[in-house]
Amino acid sequence: MTTVAIIGAGPLGRWLALGAARAGFRVLLEDVMPASLHHARESIRQELSPQELSPRELNLDALPAVSFVSSIEDAVREADLAIDCVPDELESKLEILWLLDRMAPPRTVIATPTTNLSIADLASCTYRPEKCIAIAAAPAELTAGAGPEITLRAAPATSAETVALVCDFWEKLGFRPSVERSVS
């Protein structure tokens, strides 16, 4: 895996984009709000140390391995992994999964942070339930550096390849992933 699409440039999206870029992934950070993308660009630039930035990047023309896009289609077109950073509420999750499912190539894995919703139920609403997995952490827990462990929740249909890809992603970000299988 080399390309990660992150949908939503709020605190969690910015944190994931920075971590993934530092871990060597190509990152496409998407938000429909231009002001959010601008804020994300500024925030990520300030987080990067000067030795991580080339002179061109110090001028904000680009950041290492991070591209800022304003459509989900542009974000997921080449993505191996798509992570949504939308609110953890049923309507928001269903809408974003519907969009990701239809716009991303068939190979793209969809990961969704949720503490309240069943990944089995969410995955069953897609054409790729074998490629859906939940990140069982609240955004504040992740961005606050709650610890080196992260729990992933796999639905019964989630494939071993999906689990391996997402575990690899989190390991490269410095986490120790554990996987729970939901029964329904």
Image: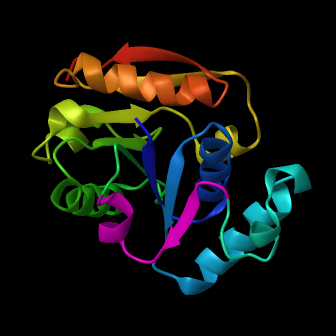
The residue sitting at 35% across, 50% down in the picture is 79
Position of 57 with respect to 12 (left or right) is right
- Where is residue 123 shown, x and y percent of the image? 21, 40
Q: Quadrant of the N terminus?
A: top left
The vertical placement of 117 against 175, above or below, is: below
- Of residue 164 and residue 118, the one placed in the foreground of this image is 164
- Where is residue 20 shown, x and y percent of the image? 60, 43
The residue sitting at 74% across, 75% down in the picture is 60
Give the quarter of the image for residue 171.
top right
The vertical placement of 136 against 140, above or below, is: above
Q: Which residues are magenta?
A: 64-77
The vertical placement of 7 against 166, above or below, is: below
Residue 130 within the segment the image draws in magenta: no
Give the number of marks.
0
Give the quarter of the image for residue 77.
bottom left
Position of 135 with respect to 145 (left or right) is left
Q: How is the image coloured?
A: rainbow
Position of 59 with respect to 171 (left or right) is right
Q: Quadrant of the C terminus?
A: top left
- Where is residue 86 shown, x and y percent of the image? 46, 60
The residue sitting at 62% across, 84% down in the picture is 35
Give the quarter of the image for residue 10.
bottom right
The residue sitting at 18% across, 30% down in the picture is 130
Position of 80 with respect to 130 (left or right) is right
The vertical placement of 18 against 32, above or below, is: above
